[in-house]
Amino acid sequence: MRIVGDAVIVVVAAIACRGDVIAGGDPNMVGVVEWRSSACAHGASQRDPMPADADIADVDDDACAFDALDDGLAWSLGFLERVPEDEAYALTRHYFPSKCGGAPAWLDPVRVPYASQLVSAKGDKLDFLLQVYAAVECEEPSAFHRTVFVFVNASGGETHARGGCRAFRSQLPRENAYYAIDPLPEGMRGHALDAELDAVRKARCDRWDVTASEAAATLRAPTRTYPEYELVVENEDRATDPTEGMQIIENNVGDDMTADDLDEIEADVYDKDNEQLATFHVMLKSDPDQVLRYCYDDGAKPLWPSVTHAPSEDNIPCCERCGAPRKFEFQILPTIISKLDVDAESDYALDFGSIAVYTCSKSCAPIECDEASQKSGAYAEEYVLVHPPLNQ
């Protein structure tokens, strides 16, 4: 049997589910979603993301993993792009960026999270991974501007441990103390904070707000950051033909593949993990450079790379601030790791199978900061599930 390239994983997915692929799905379903950027935007702390005794996802013997590729929902995909030096202003907070790496472009630049909030359950400092600017349709007037920030434990094998990944939601009304009502013209620099607000900001000790010279003067290392990218968003172009999975096979295998060859592969697909991993690879194959998948529609859920090690989605806690249910918002894919200049051979390198972020369905308003317990009222901690690395 001859199989060219990585076609075997695609074949496994399509063969294992080929009856469902051909029989089900709306052939005319193409997702279209608007993920607002800064130019058109209008208008409780997290439980540990994956306790050691967390239940794995339940396995539905009648379900086909390949069905997730035809869920009828509108998904947006995130891609990383370098920003030219003369356009670096676009990644500053005044332009409400979606970005990866560098320092956080805090939406509320004054009441940033306390240092004690940005550590794992073991006390390890968390690194800034990315932020997603996503204004959503809701009745809360304070959610005109809205950004979700994600921080990770960069030590290998720790990102999926308790508190190894945390997400914080920040939002502001259209009229606020930090930004003009209308977006800045392209290329214009935003106004600095006044002296009073700047004093409050400095008192919070944002560890990313330290220059290399200041770090040297205080005999401490500069805060580690990942390479900085803009997170560019495009609507996912779903296949209009539900049998496209079979077309992928035809385009990737040799002409001499026979029905017996397909039967041989089908016989190897004997458990849900193989099927799930194959489906995950098919999803990535359609847009290999995608690093994030976003869908705020009801019923959206992450696609995990396995069943056995997938964290359970059955008991997502309600928002600790307002009591509203949380809902899935976006998934960070392991493809992002290759963009971060980490040493893949190191046992301490950042590694995970996938990260899913769940946020308050009402996008409830900010509250006053709790100075006693050191919790920022401007940054609500949300809920995160992390699939462990596939090599563990």
Image (cartoon, rainbow, N blue to C red):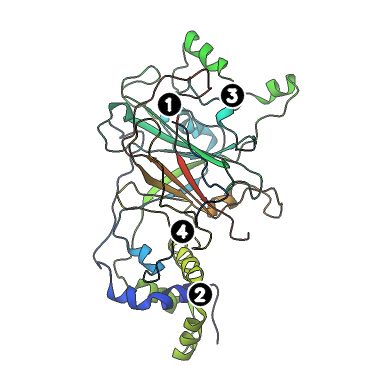
Of helix, strand and loop, which one carries label 4? Answer: loop
Q: Disc 3, disc 2: CB below 8 Å?
A: no
What amino acid is found at the position of numbered circle 3 in the picture? Asp
> Who's the residue at 61% across and 26% down the image?
207
Q: Earlier in the sequence, mark 3 or mark 4?
A: 4
Q: Which mark is residue 7?
A: 2
Q: Earlier in the sequence, mark 1 or mark 2?
A: 2
* Residue density around tag 3, few if under 14, some if 14–19, many if 20 or more, within 10 Å: some
Q: Earlier in the sequence, mark 1 or mark 3?
A: 1
What amino acid is found at the position of numbered circle 2 in the picture? Ala
Q: Disc 4, disc 1: CB below 8 Å?
A: no
Percent coordinates x, y for residue 34 in the rendering: 30, 45
Q: Which of 113/206 is in front?
A: 113
Position of residue 176 in the picture relative to residue 287 (left or right) = left
- Which of the two discs, 3 and 4, sits closer to the camera? 4
Residue on which disc 4 sits: 57
* Residue density around tag 2, few if under 14, some if 14–19, many if 20 or more, within 10 Å: some
Of helix, strand and loop, which one carries label 2? Answer: helix
Q: Which mark is residue 209?
A: 3
Q: Is residue 44 placed above or below 272 in the rendered structure?
A: above
Q: Which mark is residue 94?
A: 1
- Which of the two discs, 4 and 1, sits closer to the camera? 4
Q: Disc 3, disc 4: CB below 8 Å?
A: no
Q: CA distance from mark 4 to mark 1?
A: 41 Å
Quadrant where the image shows the N terminus: bottom right
* Residue density around tag 4, few if under 14, some if 14–19, many if 20 or more, within 10 Å: some
